[in-house]
Image (cartoon, coloured by chain):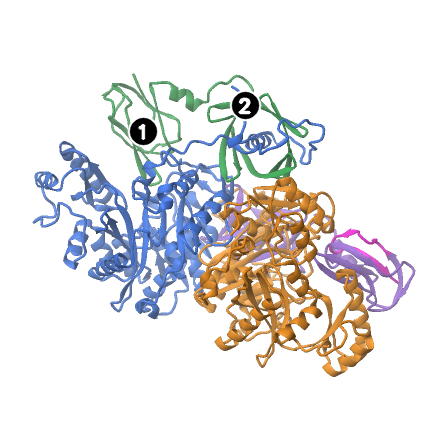
Chain colours: A orange, B blue, C purple, D green
Amino acid sequence: MDPLPRRLLIANRGEIAVRVARTAREMGIEPVGVFADADAGAFHVSHMGRSVGLGAGGPAETYLSIPRLLEAAASSEATAIHPGYGFLSENAEFARAVQAAGLLWIGPPPDAIQKMGDKLQARRRMRTAGVPVVPGSDAGATSEDPSDEDLIRRGAEIGFPLLVKASGGGGGKGMARVDRAEDLPEALEETRRVAIAAFANGRVYLEKFFESPRHVEFQVFGDRYGSVVHLFERECSVQRRHQKVLEETPSVALDPRLRESMGRAAVEAARAVGYVGAGTVEFLLDERKNFYFLEMNTRLQVEHPITEETLGLDLVRAQIEIALGAPLPAPWRGGKLLPQGHSIEMRLYAEDPNEFFPRSGRILVWEEPAGPGVRVDAGVGAGSTVGVDYDPLLAKLVVSAPDRAAAIERARRALSEWVVLGVETNAALLAAVLAAPEFRSGRYCTDLIGRLPPRAAPDPPDVAWIAAAIAAGDDVPATASAAGVSAARPSGDPWDARSGWRLGA
Amino acid sequence: MDPLPRRLLIANRGEIAVRVARTAREMGIEPVGVFADADAGAFHVSHMGRSVGLGAGGPAETYLSIPRLLEAAASSEATAIHPGYGFLSENAEFARAVQAAGLLWIGPPPDAIQKMGDKLQARRRMRTAGVPVVPGSDAGATSEDPSDEDLIRRGAEIGFPLLVKASGGGGGKGMARVDRAEDLPEALEETRRVAIAAFANGRVYLEKFFESPRHVEFQVFGDRYGSVVHLFERECSVQRRHQKVLEETPSVALDPRLRESMGRAAVEAARAVGYVGAGTVEFLLDERKNFYFLEMNTRLQVEHPITEETLGLDLVRAQIEIALGAPLPAPWRGGKLLPQGHSIEMRLYAEDPNEFFPRSGRILVWEEPAGPGVRVDAGVGAGSTVGVDYDPLLAKLVVSAPDRAAAIERARRALSEWVVLGVETNAALLAAVLAAPEFRSGRYCTDLIGRLPPRAAPDPPDVAWIAAAIAAGDDVPATASAAGVSAARPSGDPWDARSGWRLGA
Amino acid sequence: MKLSSGDRTVDVTLEDGAASLGDRIVPFIPRRGGDTLVAVEHGGQVFPVRAVREGDRVYVWSAGRTFEFRVEAAAARAPARARSARADGGGLLSPMPGRIRRVLAAEGDIVSRGQVLLVLEAMKMEHAIRSPRDGKLVRLAYAEGDLVEAGVALAEIE
Amino acid sequence: MKLSSGDRTVDVTLEDGAASLGDRIVPFIPRRGGDTLVAVEHGGQVFPVRAVREGDRVYVWSAGRTFEFRVEAAAARAPARARSARADGGGLLSPMPGRIRRVLAAEGDIVSRGQVLLVLEAMKMEHAIRSPRDGKLVRLAYAEGDLVEAGVALAEIE
């Protein structure tokens, strides 16, 4: 293994920047942060050894600016770069620029990023490697950029509903569901337009739509010496707007045989692009337990902690060591890893729990859950400003317990401890998922959240009205005596909203 | 198993009250807290479903008052009581009063508490059970309350230095080291005097003193049906003032054979008193790896989390289930438990890191470490008042990693994240232990802390002086520009105290 | 003072040892840790709580749930601005804070129900603002690149 | 202003964009999250920091370590009270805050070096306060049960 870098630039913000910084410190590497001007007081900066400003502007001019990031690395004398997820993490051009600057790139080979980044190209490679892919318009097609007429013909063969997908998209972006043949031409046009704007790649294709699929992904790792292994699955079917809200491992949908064949397919997928480092192969699993390759994320995944918890590993450390030339650890290659217990990740988003509209503001009170089996990877704290320019993910709550039932109860306990005031969050949605019989049974698929009853704003109990009045005025003596006041409800449980008084008007 | 209680009274405060409340919630039991008047805003109250006041007074009139605690259980309709550790947790009278009031006692049988609470009685039972005990004046003695002349004679046989111990003491309390025969009479008198005052039991005995012992304890669990098992060891040799500061598991001092024989002895010790529930058998391990029974703690141990982390268990849940009549889980009885990785607990005390004098005050800033492999069990938060009436333990930091070296680096990382301002803590001592070659090698014993160099107050770097000035006046514009000011030290690492400027005068 | 939560408004008065909530009297004792309200005692039992005010909003945490209250001005300043705008059929409100990514219509255009007028972007999410009915676009309040708050009127259709 | 840490006292002046620390000028930019100082920028690099003042103390966290400063009064109020008392050979100072558990000597007693005069208790720990030398106990400032702060004079020996 090459010597450790003295400083590691983390080209990201929020919880993942903090996450990577923690491992860097544990390895004796100084984590160097970056920040946009407007973000100078941001939470992640407090977890770095030092940070460097990226200047003014929005994400495109700062966290997405390759020259500014390379400058930051130079000025801080960082000799390695970890991209986190999002931003430039799956940008092959960035990876190449990092390497061209003589810096260590903590990520997969740029070629592998590129090969998986183009969905059509990736699907073709997967077919060649014998990995099943979702049936689509590109199967057996002669051109990867067919005419709309060709696509409309293929659409009729695939049947409706179907999905129009941008080859340059991924992660739930650049796709549209089409229910009727007559809507297809417009959807093709719109998707192509969006794709050109967003990904500078207007190629689109059609995919069979599954009504009640599960999304199950496999963590894979490859080293420079050609070894590729998987680190088991993550169940990612709890989604809103095609994006994950809660993940768990193991998946109740897999039995040992299915786990083995999906794991083997994931390893084959990674091998097919010469993968080195950490990656995730996403599969769609249909009701009859057929699985299909969806895409490969060529970076650390948001939900990587549940794999860390059940395997007792540090995936960021493994990323860094592999980038430095270490082989995969012998127990990984020997199939000696055995997941222990059950782990669930919940994503706390700054968004309303019903419509999922982002929310912004200032976090006035922030008290995290803690204690046994609870890990919080946060990207904000008390006083943090939540703006509109970045991902609404505030923090991830990861709970682990000996079995799934205990993990669910632990998750509910931990959620109930979390005090976040000042910015609306999706905590009520997370609580609703954990309470849903469908989720608790384990028999759920990607439509779960859509089928939940709406998260009604709860009726405040007396104690909340009183607390609100105190905070609004804060004009009550701190140790007032209750003597001499007749209690309206002297017994029972007067503070429970369920048994509670209803307001008159 | 009997049905779960609806409410559980937690007869304690601080981190352990919070710890127990968390498990209660996960089991669907409402945790009920108690608090002394002066403690009404205390941290643990915020983690309860509800709390009940114990009235005015110091610990003796509140957390140690059996009638007030039973009243609190009655008024809150709690039907079970968990004592935590300390306070009344090892008070057989309290356990009997709880049971006599028709409440469920989450602890061992009162008789077992009593049998282990008297050290002379416990030592006699251990000898009978074939468990080796530290050589002492009571071996083969005809009376358990010998005259001073008898003890002085036995002292000469045992040799100096030796320890005078109160039969009613324990946990490092009620003991005195005597180096010379001529000091023994006075030490006997003093120890007896202290013992009468503190434990209402004036019996004392002599124990051989070991120069460089280790303290290694075994977690044991028994059920109502006669099964007793151990859940492996905890290494507790990092001590100051005979009290633990840092614990780890596994112990590097044990090989599988020694672990097996000590574990067997621990199980025999528990069996000998008909033990049910969670307990800890403490052993002294000498340089030649002979082990001796020291005492048994008949309650949950402060350092129980490291066992939870390496085994993936919830010991409080097990306590409650066993108290409700559940048998020990089958995998425990079948010897199927296998510790994974390495875990270290550090106790953050409100005390100075050199002399270990308690510190009081108000916690102005409190930011806990978090992230992978980090668990914090805290008893305070921002704004908490640290008084002089209670244990100085503020919080426990528990880190886990695949191996000991990684756990140590993780511990250092986590400690470095912890921001505690307003009350002095022993964080610098913890950091010094983690950095000490002796500790890192694993070859250390109870004299470790005494052998460390003093924790010199570090020289503040420039950034700290500037921050102090800002906080003192806070009269600098939030976004002042540095333009136009000539940098005194434009390059290098001017913020590092090691390379730092020394103040002139 | 008048506090609102959801569609309820209540007169809350705090006295020494008791609160009047509408027409009920509820005895209580606030419990503080340092200066911060951390619990409220009622009937001999203490319940943890957190509460903080920002502008005319009060946020409260109690028993694992979060509540938002509005402090209503003393005068009869009836419904809040956002709501009044929503009630006004002509206004088209921003559903979230964000940045105007694209403007797809111009003032004076005749627009049809469902037509996308604007694309609003926040936190990596694009949201199409569609016309609620057929009509004439008489006002477009923002241009591409503008930052908007949640609840502000983006456009008006006659 | 004058700040002290350990046995060092420094004149610190903050100007727009720079601090004078004694005779050196160090350019810096404070960085805040909300109202809270969270980092200090120097030479293009930003270093996290936390700082808070309470009375004449300022507590600072920087790079994983904690520092305590004293804000010295503007006037020449030389050494702090505790230190002056400590310097005074006759005074016996409380090493920690706590409660006087036992008083084992009386004013007027002739005491010898090492003799236990008081037992101070805090947080389950007893600490014996011993006479630093032979002499006469001329003052005992507290009685059993009294609460004392760290650094106050408990007794005086002539």
User: In the picture provided, is D8 more to the left or to the right than B272?
Assistant: right
Q: Chain of mark 1?
A: D
User: In the picture provided, is A390 more to the left or to the right than B218?
Assistant: right
Q: Which residue was labeled with disc 1?
A: D143
- Toward the viewer: D80 or B443? B443
Whole-number angstrom distance, CA of label 2 to CA of label 1: 40 Å
Q: Which residue was labeled with disc 2?
A: D10
- Toward the viewer: A172 or C129? A172
Residue B33 visible at all: no
Q: Is residue B414 above or below residue B190?
A: below
Give the secondary structure at mark 2.
Answer: strand
Please tell me which of labels 2 and 1 falls first in the chain.
Answer: 2
- Kindly indicate the quadrant of the structure image that contains residue B187: top left
Q: Which residues are the magenta region?
A: C140-158
**Residue D90 placed where, x, y %?**
33, 18
Disc 2 vs disc 1: which is toward the camera?
2
- Kindly indicate the quadrant of the structure image that contains residue B76: bottom left
Marks 2/1 in contact by CB < 8 Å: the verdict is: no
- Say which residue appears at 41% left-offset and 54% top-offset: B403
